């Protein structure tokens, strides 16, 4: 498994756009998550975001919230999630980026948390609710453990803040396409088209767009606007949740993953 930066460097050299699917760990169960990671890897995922179930996921829409609730009810913990990563990590080409809210990290202790996820093979970290002003508390120790912490840029962020986030973010910059929570939408926020060139003025780091991507057409549009990567979450989580069986869900996300990859 390469690092996130190495992955984007390779894609840049090949002139390719990254596909980054997101799934919630433990929904419908951890065995399915283990299989899903391998399926997404072979179906074209360049980086995989793995969501740690949390009881108060403020940045997530109803689909991912419901998935997190189901996983928590089944007893899914960070330790169990990391066991999944340890099980499949050496079989994957795509680096795994853990998506976790800050409270569980703070509760365990930053150093303990980072050491555990690094030992499991996690390569990156997204913390949607950590403000830029507090990010420094985790950016430096994370780098020492070989973990790249990616920060989010909101469409409402002022220029000075966009610049500051761009300078601090590691691996890539996560550009949120809309104001609000995650979830599938009929179209991608057009603000992205304006924000991408603004961000380019401040950084040459990869910029990936997420929130609302639910169709191959969305992915294609984001690539045409100049993004380095496309992130899709709720559309994958919903396919796993709505399927008649875990296997049917795995088949559905493989088909969807390949369709997004083909579009970019």
Image (tube, helix red, strand yellow):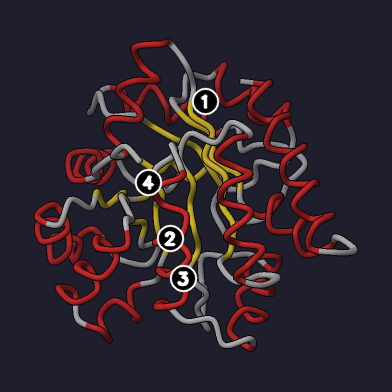
Identify the residue under disc 1.
193
Q: How far is the residue under mark 4 from the one under mark 1? A: 14 Å
Q: Say which mark, if any, is on residue 81.
A: 3
Task: Point out the tag, 2 or 4, that comes first from the N-terminus.
Answer: 2
- Image quadrant containing the C terminus: top right
Numbered disc 3: secondary structure: helix
Q: Nearer the viewer, residue 7 or 129?
A: 7
**Which of the 4 image quarters holds residue 31?**
bottom right
Q: How far is the residue under mark 2 from the one under mark 3? A: 7 Å
Identify the residue under disc 4.
153
Q: How far is the residue under mark 2 from the one under mark 4? A: 27 Å
- Count neighbours of disc 4 (C-alpha within 10 A) and say few if under 14, some if 14 to 19, many if 20 or more: many
Tell me where residue 45 appears, x and y as whole percent: 55, 36
Task: Point out the tag, 1 or 2, that comes first from the N-terminus.
Answer: 2
Is mark 2 in CB contact (under 8 Å) with mark 3?
yes
> Compared with residue 61, is residue 56 higher up or lower down, i.e. above or below?
below
**Which of the 4 image quarters holds residue 23?**
bottom right
Front position among marks 4 and 3 = 3
Task: Point out the tag, 4 or 3, that comes first from the N-terminus.
Answer: 3
- Count neighbours of disc 1 (C-alpha within 10 A) and say few if under 14, some if 14 to 19, many if 20 or more: some
Left or right of residue 31: residue 159: left
Identify the residue under disc 2.
85
> Compared with residue 199, is residue 242 higher up or lower down, i.e. above or below?
below
């Amino acid at each position: 498994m390469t690092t996130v930066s190495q992955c984007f460097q390779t894609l840049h050299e090949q002139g390719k756009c990254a596909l980054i699917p997101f799934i919630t760990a433990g929904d419908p169960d951890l065995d399915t998550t283990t299989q899903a990671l391998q399926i997404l890897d072979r179906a074209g995922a360049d980086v995989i975001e793995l969501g740690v179930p949390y009881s108060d996921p403020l940045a997530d829409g109803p689909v991912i919230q419901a998935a997190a609730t189901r996983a928590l009810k089944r007893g899914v913990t960070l330790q169990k999630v990391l066991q999944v990563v340890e099980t499949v990590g050496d079989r994957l080409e795509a680096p795994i980026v853990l998506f976790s809210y800050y409270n569980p990290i703070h509760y365990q202790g930053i150093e303990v948390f980072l050491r555990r996820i690094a030992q499991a093979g996690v390569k990156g970290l997204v913390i949607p609710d950590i403000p830029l002003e507090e990010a420094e508390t985790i950016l430096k120790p994370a780098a020492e453990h070989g973990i790249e912490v990616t920060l989010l840029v909101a469409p409402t962020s002022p220029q000075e803040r966009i610049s500051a986030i761009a300078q601090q973010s590691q691996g890539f910059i996560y550009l949120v396409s809309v104001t609000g929570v995650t979830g599938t939408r009929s179209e991608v926020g057009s603000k992205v088209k304006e924000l991408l060139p603004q961000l380019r003025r401040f950084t040459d780091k990869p910029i990936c767009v997420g929130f609302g991507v639910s169709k191959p057409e969305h992915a294609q549009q984001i690539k045409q606007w100049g993004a380095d990567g496309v992130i899709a979450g709720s559309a994958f989580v919903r396919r796993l949740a709505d399927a008649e069986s875990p296997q049917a869900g795995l088949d559905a996300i493989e088909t969807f993953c390949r369709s997004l990859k083909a579009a970019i």
